[in-house]
């Protein structure tokens, strides 16, 4: 390991004056801006994926070790200042620049196995002689021809694809697809379950890049970037159930949620399960991202159940609704990346139209007083959800507001938030924030 990338103890950040920390972060962001190969969006963010088994990146871009080293150094500097999300994003971009950038790979939790950088679970599977296949999941590569010929392993023997489907036709006996963070159960098909599991791992990368300050505490951040110790495989992965049809989804869940037929996806926080169904009729990705983000926040360490029950529930829904704007892209040279919070995706355009053209708004000072039942019982949920998505996008777009908004979410999920919390954290009255939000939308409209 090149000692140039070794970091000083993160605990020293506590002794740095806040102004100095702020200046240090701005300097890092300015240097990052100079190194970026993509432009800054007027509204929204680019989020890159570290190339691995789940990202399906087939880049033809030549590796740039010099750029990767600069980005990795910035990542370690950000970690020194306790800036987890910035550190994770910079480390990710370092391995995009050079997939063999060792300091960044180690900080992100990858392990080298037979010359390949693998995730923790991937390394465990590799130790069993298995590789991730984008169609069939973890398989022995020598068995691939049998899979492609329509055979499937079932109870230590090979059977036809049709017999395998019959054996897994009931959701209780569905296929189980395990990845680093998720366990997907499905009775649709092995291939559909594997595709969903890969998509969820991509979502997890995006979410962590944006909300590492929520999910990673100072101790873990220090371990990642200073000692290269990263939490291993989740002992209890996120449970996701993928039903074959909407009818089966409704029948399975109606006892838990009488209005299940009105949904195309749902997360049950007390059971810690997300449920979806295969559909060619609906555009299901926005709901998949929305409900899965609820799951990622809710099942983070330190999160308590029923966040926002008494007040501040808007932010719980607003940040999940913001993720409905998530879109996967692929560059001409094969690099997979995402955009989020752009005006043409999700509900931001509706939020802009309703406020600027129709005059619809719920003042933020009123919105923060609404708990879960208060909010869900309103008759204006459709326009209100657009406003909540717009507010979350506004908060995440502003470098000044973003860290306070993430801290606000932490306090909501820890049951420590009160109606005045967001105003206090941001150092602004709610009337001021309403004005800034309106100006944000006006600028988009120009």
Image: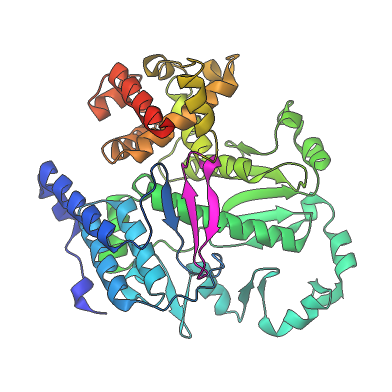
The verdict on residue 352 being magenta is no
* Residue 2 horizontal/vertical position (percent): 23, 79
The verdict on residue 333 being magenta is yes
Q: Is residue 82 left or right of residue 102?
A: left
Residue at 77% across, 42% down: 281
Residue at 54% across, 26% down: 385
The magenta span reads: 323-343
User: Quadrant of the image for the C terminus?
Assistant: top left
Q: Is residue 122 left or right of residue 39?
A: right
Residue at 39% across, 27% down: 442
Residue at 38% across, 75% down: 98
Nearer to the camera, 282 or 121: 282
User: Quadrant of the image for the N terminus?
Assistant: bottom left
- Count numbered badges in the picture: 0
Q: Quadrant of residue 200?
A: bottom right
Q: Is residue 239 left or right of residue 365?
A: right
Q: Does 21 sit above or below residue 36?
A: above
Q: Is residue 317 left or right of residue 150?
A: left
* Residue 206 horizontal/vertical position (percent): 46, 53
Q: Quadrant of residue 144?
A: bottom right
């Amino acid at each position: 390991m090149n000692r140039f990338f070794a970091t000083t103890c993160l605990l020293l950040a506590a002794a740095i004056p806040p102004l100095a920390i702020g200046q240090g972060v701005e300097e890092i962001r300015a240097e990052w801006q100079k190194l970026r190969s993509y432009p800054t969006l007027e509204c929204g963010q680019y989020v890159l994926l570290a190339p691995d088994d789940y990202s399906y990146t087939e880049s033809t871009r030549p590796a740039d070790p010099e750029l990767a080293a600069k980005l990795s150094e910035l990542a370690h500097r950000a970690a020194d200042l306790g800036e987890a999300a910035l550190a994770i994003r910079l480390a990710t971009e370092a391995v995009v620049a050079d997939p063999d950038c060792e300091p960044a790979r180690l900080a992100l939790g990858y392990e080298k196995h037979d010359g390949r950088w693998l995730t923790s679970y991937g390394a465990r599977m590799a130790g069993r002689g298995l590789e991730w296949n984008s169609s069939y999941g973890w398989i022995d590569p020598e068995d691939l021809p049998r899979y492609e010929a329509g055979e499937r392993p079932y109870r230590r023997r090979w059977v036809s694809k049709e017999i395998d489907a019959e054996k897994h036709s009931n959701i209780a006996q569905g296929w189980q697809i395990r990845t680093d963070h998720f366990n997907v159960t499905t009775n649709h098909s092995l291939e559909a379950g594997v595709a969903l599991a890969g998509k969820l791992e991509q979502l997890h990368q995006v979410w962590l890049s944006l909300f590492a300050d929520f999910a990673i505490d100072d101790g873990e951040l220090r371990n990642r970037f200073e000692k290269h110790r990263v939490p291993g495989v989740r002992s209890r992965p996120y449970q996701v159930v993928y039903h074959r049809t909407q009818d089966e989804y409704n029948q399975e869940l109606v006892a838990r949620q009488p209005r299940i037929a009105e949904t195309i996806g749902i997360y049950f926080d007390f059971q810690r399960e997300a449920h979806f169904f295969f559909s060619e009729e609906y555009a299901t990705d926005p709901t998949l991202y929305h409900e899965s983000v609820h799951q990622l926040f809710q099942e983070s360490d330190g999160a308590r159940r029923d966040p926002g029950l008494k007040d501040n529930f808007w932010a719980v829904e607003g940040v999940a609704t913001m993720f409905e704007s998530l879109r996967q892209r692929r560059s001409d040279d094969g690099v997979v990346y995402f955009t989020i919070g752009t005006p043409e995706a999700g509900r931001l355009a509706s939020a802009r139209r309703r406020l600027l053209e129709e005059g619809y708004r719920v003042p933020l000072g009123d919105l923060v007083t609404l708990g879960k039942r208060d909010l869900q019982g309103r008759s204006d949920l459709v326009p209100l959800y657009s406003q909540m998505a717009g507010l979350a996008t506004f908060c995440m777009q502003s470098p000044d507001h973003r860290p306070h908004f993430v801290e606000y979410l932490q306090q909501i999920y820890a049951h420590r938030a009160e109606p005045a919390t967001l105003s206090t954290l941001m150092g602004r009255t709610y009337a001021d924030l309403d004005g800034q939000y309106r100006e944000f939308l006006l600028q988009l409209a120009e």
